[in-house]
Amino acid sequence: MNSSVNLPGNPAVNPAVNNSSDLNRKNERLNRELKALGKVLVAFSGGVDSTFLVSAAQAALGEEVQAVTISTPYIPKWEVEEARQLACAIGVRHRVVNLEMPEELRDNPPQHCYVCKKHLFTVLLEVAEKIGIPHVIEGTNADDLKDYRPGRKALVELKIRSPLLKAGLTKSDIRRLSRMAGLDTWDKPAYACLLSRIPVNTRVETADLDRIEKAERFLMDIGFRAVRVRTHGDVARIEVDPDRISELVKADSIHDIQGALKRVGYAHVSVDLTGYRTGSMNLNEDRD
């Protein structure tokens, strides 16, 4: 989404600025946890949580931090590029690891989040071992435990550390601390991989992922930051926040949304009147 990056030279949070003693304690706990680890590889997507984690790790450990972003066919290319920009602005060492589509995800199994996390974090552990880093950390927060997150099981099995969770930081805490630290990601909407736009047990083709990414990028560019284009064969089902549905319909007359989505490969375009909600492709399975 190429949001502008505006970061201070050292994004560490100054606890004196924060008038919440509870938030102070959590932030201090995070700092102690990171310093105790000594040297870390951070799984870095460029989202709210992982960006704050990279920033905090950089402040605590300096050169002992390596951020790694994984690029796969089901992760939007703009997310990878945005992660590059953020890492550069923070000043952390960063690399992108490119992976092919794992065959075990090709038919989008119901537990694709678990399968994906197991695969990607196994790769991150291998990268960490090769460059002599003893710990891989990631950005799960305390609120994530309230939701259905099958990918969390893979992280536990692989012994991946979650410092934000251990410090008790919630999503709102992280957004607040990110804003205080000067991180533009403080109000960034949540995103999820493109597999969450396709029904489970459906063959995933590269062309499907490409048209989803192009369709969502178009909608973001005309102002709908929190959007999903759920895909049912040649039908696009657009989800935006419920209070923006009427705005989306009106935007069609200005931006020709229907025409734009047909040009990227959809035959029919619909608007979900319920609005955006996580896990709408399968309410009993993965959440995005």
Image (tube, rainbow, N blue to C red):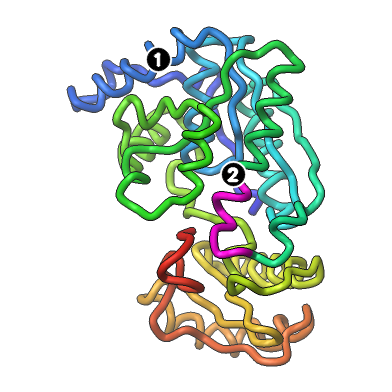
Q: Secondary structure at mark 1?
A: helix
In the image, residue 283 lies in the stretch drawn in magenta: no
User: Could you say where residue 40 lies in the image, as x and y percent from the top left?
Assistant: 58, 17
Give residue 67's position: percent from left, percent from top.
Answer: 64, 26
Question: Is residue 151 rendered to the left or right of residue 213?
Answer: left
Looking at the image, is mark 1 or mark 2 earlier in the sequence? Answer: 1
Q: Nearer the viewer, mark 1 or mark 2?
A: 2
Q: Within 10 Å of the Cα at label 1, are there few (<14), some (14-19), or many (20+) other Cα atoms?
A: some
For the residue carrying disc 2, how many other residues have a C-alpha within 10 Å: few (<14), some (14-19), or many (20+)? some
> Can you say which quadrant of the picture contains the N terminus?
bottom right
Residue 117: numbered disc:
2
Q: Which residue is mark 1?
A: 33
User: Picture coordinates of residue 136 (x, y %)?
Assistant: 58, 24
Which amino acid type is marked by label 1? Glu
Q: Is residue 126 left or right of residue 189?
A: right
Q: Tell me which amino acid carries mark 2.
A: Lys
Q: Nearer the viewer, residue 61 or 136?
A: 136
For residue 165, side relative to residue 45 (left or right): left
In the foreground, 12 or 275: 275
Corner quadrant of residue 101: bottom right
Query: Real-space Cα distance between discs 1 and 2?
Result: 23 Å
Name the residue at 60% across, 48% down: 3
- Which residue: 35% across, 42% down? 171
Give coordinates of residue 102: x percent, y percent. Answer: 75, 52
The reply to whether discs 1 and 2 touch (Cβ–Cβ < 8 Å) is no
Residue at image position (40%, 35%) is 179
Q: Which residues are magenta?
A: 109-117
Q: Residue at x 63, y 72 (%)?
A: 201
User: In the structure shown, which secondary structural element does the residue marked by tag 2 occupy?
Assistant: helix
Q: Main secondary structure of the magenta part?
A: helix
